Image (cartoon, rainbow, N blue to C red):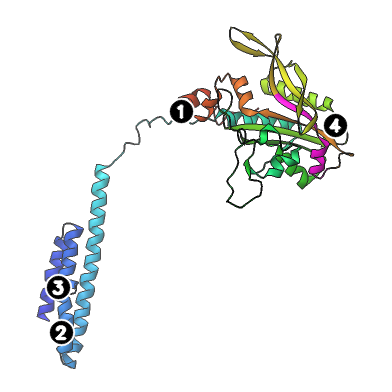
Amino acid sequence: MDTLDALKTKYLSKIEGAGDETALEEVRVAALGKKGEVSLQMRSLGQMSPEERQVAGPALNALKADLTEALALRRDGLADAALNARLAEEWADVSLTPRPQQQGTLHPISQVTEEVIAIFADLGYGVAEGPQVENDWYNFDSLNIPPEHPSRQEMDTFYMHREAGDNRPPHVLRTHTSPVQVRHMEAHGAPCRIICPGRVYRADYDQTHTPMFHQVEGLAIDTDISMANLKWTLEEFCCAFFEIDDITLRFRASHFPFTEPSAEVDIRCSWEDGQLKLGEGDDWLEILGSGMVHPKVLSNAGIDPEVYQGFAFGIGIDRIAMLKYGIPDLRAFFESDLRWLRHYGFSPLASAG
């Protein structure tokens, strides 16, 4: 028993004197490790008589428990001391003026998209969305686009890869959001009034074209819709979007496979000292394409063209953003230049429309 008391005194003193966790671990190994002094004493129990074990066993277990508890307490004390030392060194004066935080801005494309959605919502239009990777039927065939049409050439459209031996028409990155209109008519029927904003893709790149850009297309189907309704809708939109009370639009006959009749739409403008002014002057600027939905498109979408008719239009979101906010180069939209974003960006808290 004297030996156990001496071990207890010895190791409690060493535990108390350990200055860090490394030294404390060395004390633990020396006392309670596989070859530690207390562990060796525990092994010697097998060589004792039963009477001796009855006395020595509980005493050794009590010693081991006391040392284990002392080690845990000392470890907690060292951790607290280390934390206090760190807090003493790493402190912050909360009364100081904080560093100014840079506020992000809303990209012009996001801003204009929200403006367009808000304007058409006031006109009673819902928003429809669809996949950006489309199959041949929805992107071309359902829209009455013939096989020989230039838009189906690889120089204009991004085609997806097909494995050798797979003779199905390859999927494409959608070249317009018109497939969303067909999908919506299939799913919901007529009448309907929707806009379809989203990304579209074409193989083109210059100051006014990029391989990926943004469109919003509109569709209105009912039993008594005419070109007059189309004209009114576009005039109302342009007045609201460009914030000009008197907008004059000019409709020029054109051809699109999915509308008949079709019309390009120009807006009256003027150029003074290199500055574009909308709503006045003797010049015209093309801003969108439109027309009455082709009967074949209605039939392909499951709508009876003998009962229903309607109009459709397509507007380049990037293009009208450039016109409204004086942005000269379309490519800058996608260059991630923070200086450009700070200059042309919008406050996230500003209301759209």
Where residue 346 appears, x then y in whole percent?
A: 55, 27
Front residue of 95/342: it is 342
Q: In this figure, which residue is indicated by the disc labeled 1?
A: 338
| Magenta-colored stretch includes residue 298 | yes
**What SS does tag 4 mark?**
loop
- Identify the residue shown where x is 85% and y is 29%: 226
User: Residue 236's quadrant in the figure?
Assistant: top right
Of all residues shown, which one is farthest toward the bottom?
50
Of all residues shown, which one is farthest toward the right?
306
Give the class, few, some or many, for how many residues have Cα within 10 Å of label 3's Cα (few <14, many ≥20): some
Q: In this figure, which residue is indicated by the disc labeled 3?
A: 8
Can I make out residue 132 in this image? no
> Label 4 amino acid?
Ile
Q: Earlier in the sequence, mark 4 or mark 3?
A: 3
- Identify the residue shown where x is 13% and y is 75%: 37
Q: Is residue 71 left or right of residue 157?
A: left
Q: Which residues are magenta?
A: 288-303
Q: Is residue 136 above or below residue 95?
A: below
Q: In this figure, which residue is indicated by the disc labeled 4?
A: 225
Q: Is residue 94 above or below residue 50?
A: above
